[in-house]
Image (cartoon, grey):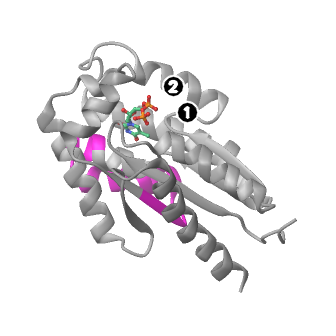
């Protein structure tokens, strides 16, 4: 059993459609679990009972069901509930929380994709979450056409119906976020095999765990 950490570790996986994040959330969770860590896997939008109800409103219906601002407000309402009721209590118990998407998705999708801009998203962030931040973020990067091909093969949600220019703004947005916060954000080339991506991710996470225990 690995030593219990005083404050857990909050890891988020981010990226465009079809980038393989969800598979890697599970793989990383299994690796850390096998190494004796207590792990909580979660996702956004959703992750708590209330936030899952909001998720349903967000991922179903026509692509233009919500305008960008309404969508952002729903995302942050869901996120606040998720953070308060699931993420913070787990971190307080020394657990490692791995979330399939978090607030960088709001910056990329609503901020850059829908054009709300950085400042609006940052204001919503501070108002709803204060200075709470992930410890480590992986940004899965993939050429837009490859991601959409993969996503279409598995069936689509509201967001995959957005036009191709939207998906280009998303990708550029995620890369810019990583550039602004290089200590927190690691860009992952998502075109590798699942095994390669898993190895790269877990090497970085294990190093961060070691540094936190030192
Ligand atoms: P999901 O089916 O979970 O997609 P994926 O497997 O690609 O993660 O649906 C979540 C969708 O919500 C996804 O298209 C991205 C979008 N989203 C935002 O637009 N803003 C956000 O803040 C979050 C968390 C997700």
Counting labels gives: 2
Near-viewer residue (58 or 191):
191
Q: Which residue is mark 1?
A: 46
Secondary structure state at the residue bearing disc 1: loop
Near-viewer residue (9 or 71):
9
The x and y percentages for residue 209 are 66, 73
Which residue is outermost to the left? Answer: 165
Instruction: Name the front one of labels 1 and 2.
Output: 1
At horizontal 61% and vertical 36% (from top left) the residue drawn is: 47
Q: Which mark is residue 54?
A: 2
- Above or below: residue 62 compared with residue 124: above
At horizontal 78% and vertical 72% (from top left) the residue drawn is: 6
Residue stretch rendered in magenta on the structure: 109-138
Q: Name the quarter showing ligand 1.
A: top left
- Above or below: residue 155 compared with residue 69: above
Asked if residue 107 shows in the view, the reply is yes
- Above or below: residue 65 compared with residue 8: above
Q: Is residue 111 magenta?
A: yes
Q: Are marks 1 and 2 in contact (CB under 8 Å)?
A: yes
The x and y percentages for residue 149 are 26, 30
Q: Is residue 147 left or right of residue 82?
A: left
Ligand 1 lies under 8 Å from the Cβ of mark 1 = yes
At horizontal 36% and vertical 73% (from top left) the residue drawn is: 182
Q: Quadrant of the C terminus?
A: bottom right
Mark 1 or mark 2: whose residue is earlier in sequence: 1
Q: Is residue 85 left or right of residue 169?
A: right
Q: Is residue 133 magenta?
A: yes
- How far apart marks 1 and 2 lie (CA) works out to 7 Å
């Amino acid at each position: 059993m690995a030593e219990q950490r005083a404050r857990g570790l909050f890891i988020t996986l981010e990226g465009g459609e079809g980038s393989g994040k969800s598979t890697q959330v599970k793989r990383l969770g299994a690796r850390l679990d096998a190494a004796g860590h207590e792990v909580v896997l979660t996702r956004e939008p959703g992750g708590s009972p209330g936030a899952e109800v909001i998720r349903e409103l967000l991922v179903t219906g026509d692509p233009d069901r919500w305008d960008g601002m309404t969508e952002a407000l729903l995302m942050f309402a869901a996120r606040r509930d998720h953070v308060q009721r699931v993420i913070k209590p787990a971190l307080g118990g020394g657990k490692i929380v791995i979330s399939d998407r978090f607030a960088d998705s709001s910056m990329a999708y609503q901020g850059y994709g829908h054009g709300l801009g950085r400042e609006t998203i940052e204001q919503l962030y501070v108002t709803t979450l204060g200075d709470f931040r992930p410890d480590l973020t992986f940004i899965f990067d993939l050429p837009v056409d490859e991601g959409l091909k993969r996503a279409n093969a598995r069936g689509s949600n509201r967001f995959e119906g957005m036009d191709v220019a939207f998906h280009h703004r998303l990708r550029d947005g995620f890369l810019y976020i990583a550039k602004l916060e290089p200590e927190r954000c690691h860009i992952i080339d998502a075109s590798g095999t699942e095994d390669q991506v898993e190895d790269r991710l877990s090497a970085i996470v294990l190093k961060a765990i070691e540094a936190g225990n030192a």
